[in-house]
Amino acid sequence: MSPGEPALVALILNQIRRAGPISFRWFMEQALYHAEHGYYSSGRAVIGRRGDYFTNVSVGPLFGRMMAAQFREMWAALGQPTDFAIVEQGAQNGDFAGDVLRTIRGSMPDFFAALRYVIIEPFLILRARQVEALAAFGEIVSWRESIELMEPFEGLHFSNELFDALPVHLLSRGASESDWTEKCVTEEAERFRFVSQPSSDPRLASRAQQIPIPPGVAYETEVNMAAPKLVAAVAEKLVRGWLFIVDYGYTREDFYSPARSDGTVQSFLRHRKLPSPLLEVGRADITAHVEWTTLADEALGCGLQLAGFTDQHHFMTGLAAGPMRAEVESAGATGATRALQTLLHPTLLGRTFQYLAFARGVSPAAELSGFSFAQEPKTALGFAAR
């Protein structure tokens, strides 16, 4: 296997030669989001059977149709405001947005009349694809370069597999060591390799001290500083409504299990897991599981309320028993049976993904159908009620 895209490899190697070892966070950021050569930002990422990985969206339009039903329920819970924004971040090629908007336009005209769809997209190549894919919806769709440039809104912020792609720091500690060191990236014979060194970032050192692994255990893990920052940025813009996250991960207790001593960072190319995230840079996806409890801590600290947490199997079952019941019952007639089984089945995608929702200014009685069969969220996330 090669180090990756030659131009990107050369750029990173030059940075190492100028300044010494670089943090894995910076390395991952360049690999995925360098403006010209990054895996996502260059438009090189391909999803689906012929790509590098599967998502709920690649199963077909059923995921978008089911989420549209949940979004309409959210709109109704807010009293059917005349300006309801769905703010999607990580929209990729716009397929999910298209599935949602076609469903709402076709069967929920009252909701469609109140809706505007905003995509947070910093990369021009992806925005161009989204513009083309969503051309039929005209002015109902608009774009912002970042969440910081989004105006305060009422509605919901939605992301599907965004948080797992945020750059992370890598930390390690030997069995005989008391302090954490940061795993950085250096060069050896024009290839990348890991090297450990003390972290110069006091915020990272502080987070490291919160990792619940006792001394005397050899351990490697990652810390995502960007994820809580994004939660806080959305909370600042959300006047009333929901922050809704779909991704894969673990609660804090499971994330830092002694048995998970190698962390969760993985790299995929054409559905194959690579032996190292330092290979095929700019050509392969790099991902790390979400640590859900820290996100909940951040959201609650920003004044949001916990609205629900469950896996995809239970979430989709809740929708299937509620607002999507008629469509699910006719799934065989519409050819959606296989897609529904893929989304629901515990051994397929049903247990792979989790759904975490926070609310602001929403009545406590406004329960979402997707969380009908969910465990009490604070108990599920593993921290005491506040």
Image (cartoon, rainbow, N blue to C red):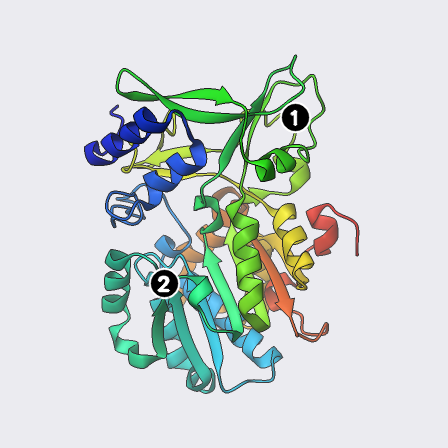
Task: Give how far across and how far down residue 158 sits, in percent.
Answer: 48, 63
Can residue 220 be spotted in the picture? yes
Residue drawn at (55%, 35%) of the image: 201
Mark on residue 139? none
Q: Which amino acid does the dot numbered 2 rest on? A: Glu
Residue drawn at (52%, 40%) of the image: 289
Residue drawn at (79%, 54%) of the image: 385
| Quadrant including the N terminus | top left
Residue at far top of view: 176
Left or right: 162 with respect to 316? left
**Which is more toward the observer, 292 or 303?**
303
**Which is more toward the observer, 10 or 285?**
10
When the figure is inspected, residue 198 is found, relative to residue 136, above or below; the finding is above
Can residue 331 be spotted in the picture? no
Disc 1, SS:
loop
Q: Which amino acid does the dot numbered 1 rest on? A: Pro
| Quadrant including the C terminus | bottom right
Left or right: 152 with respect to 284? right
Report the number of numbered marks. Answer: 2
* Crowding at mark 1 (Cα within 10 Å: few <14, some 14-19, many 20+): some
Mark on residue 258? 1
Left or right: 21 with respect to 3? right
Left or right: 336 with respect to 136? right
> Which of the 4 image quarters holds residue 174?
top right
Quickly name the residue at label 2. 145
When the figure is inspected, residue 83 is found, relative to residue 202, above or below; the finding is below
Task: Give how far across and how far down residue 53 sits, in percent.
Answer: 35, 43
Front of the two marks 1 and 2: 2
Task: Give how far across and how far down residue 71 sits, in percent.
Answer: 51, 72
Residue drawn at (45%, 63%) of the image: 147
> Of callouts 1 and 2, which one flags the residue occurring earlier in the amino acid sequence?
2
Disc 2, SS:
loop
